[in-house]
Amino acid sequence: MRIVPGNARSAGARESQQDEFGFSDMEDRAFTAHGGVLAVVADGMGGLAMGREAARTAKTAMIREYEAKPPQEDVPRALHHALRQANAAVFEMARRAGIEEGKTGSTLAAAVVRGENLYWASVGDSRIYLRRRGRLARLTEDHVYGLELAMEVAAGTLSREEAETHPQRGQVVSFLGLRSLGRVDRSVKPFPLQPGDRILLCSDGLYNALSDEEMAELSGGPPQEACEALVRGTLSKGLKNQDNVTVAMLACEADPAPAPKASPSGGRPRGRGRRATAALLFAILCGAGVFFYAKTWHVGTNAPAPGGNAAMPADNETGQQPPEPAEENPPESRADDPTSKDPVEPPTTDNGSPEAVDSQMPDNETSHEDAKPQDEAASEGPPDNATGVGPQETPDGDNATGPMEVERSEPPAHSRRRLSSGVVEGSISSSHPGDTGLDKTPSGNRTTTQNEEARKQEERNFP
């Protein structure tokens, strides 16, 4: 709960101002944590000597002694102690001035708001009010002779009419400046406060001119404006003997809601930008991983595109792809790509006739540890097209093993018969015992696996 003070005063129709008010140090956070905020109003008794000095001494001593409160001391005890010290200070002031006891003095009203609780203490006829939801309630009693008259009325020794018309009924009977402190009105238990409550301390010049309803109506604005409105309302009455009027207020307001913390990214909640960035990076990494995985699978396995027939190179007229001249120094990447086949020139026999070629293989896959005779290589039929390269042609354009024409829409019948004849792609028959016909280099095993996968794919495409 936040405390907002307000104050105002006027001399009224009097020649001098003998009222005083004051507050404890509200900036001292260490003290307000255990002592709260103190407000004081003191009214020097004008009919006695040195009324202004008595009020000032009482106010100063009260604030000073209360601010000396140790943290472990409770507020009601500290208030009562400070009030006794203020009384002693006024008494000592009168003694030094040579004034007889009881010939000078001051009233005093003190209120403390600590946390959400109210404490108070008063001597004399200065009052403390509580304004809540537009209504005013008095918290203190007036220490005047009229109170004693009321007690006599209650006891039956005095009539009500006599008490109300008694000439001394407003005379203050308890005040600061006596050897021993007289009647004191103080709270023992904390009074709970609510946001919007107002604690109003005033001298008798205010409530003698305004009714409780008028005071409640004028005290509804902001604290400082409300105090000034109360004083103006009092003076507007135009009373001939208007006494000094003084008002001090402690307004209880709810603590403002804490503002949301701004993030470094310009007002967005902290962490949202980081989560969005992390999600974006994760999505990019996942997409890149899927892309490279798919690309590596197609290249490494030489698999045909999904949903399509096996691609067969074909000439524009014969349906066969003529061989291209072999490169003298093929790029190094051709050796690593099993789908890259370098066409080779068909070897010739001694009489210059072309010799059948067993298969088209890359340079790094045609090397075998056991070299075969040329006549054995000529007797072997070429393997089926397992790598997507067309059948090897002789110089006159005829296929050594017979042309295999394939159309993209429907495969020829003899192509289906060759696939069902039991010939295993990727294997080469040999008359040498123990010779499997497979390339003994590491790339030979990869070619066999690839040929097997290509054969299965071709069987699915050409049932």
Image (cartoon, rainbow, N blue to C red):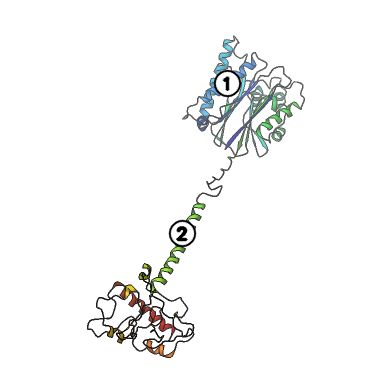
The image shows residue 274 at horizontal and vertical percentages of 49, 52
Q: Is residue 407 above or below residue 44?
A: below
Tell me which residue sits at (46%, 59%) in the image.
282
Number of numbered discs overlaid on the protein picture: 2
Under mark 2, the amino acid is Phe
Under mark 1, the amino acid is Thr
Q: Is residue 90 above or below residue 307?
A: above
The quarter of the image holding the N terminus is top right
Between 254 and 290, the one lying in front of the other is 290
Left or right placement of residue 444 versus residue 8 in this view: left
The image quadrant of residue 359 is bottom left
Marks 2/1: CA–CA distance:
71 Å
The image shows residue 453 at horizontal and vertical percentages of 37, 78
Left or right placement of residue 265 versus residue 143 in this view: left
Asked whether residue 159 is in view, the answer is no
Q: Which residue is labeled 2 in the image?
A: 282
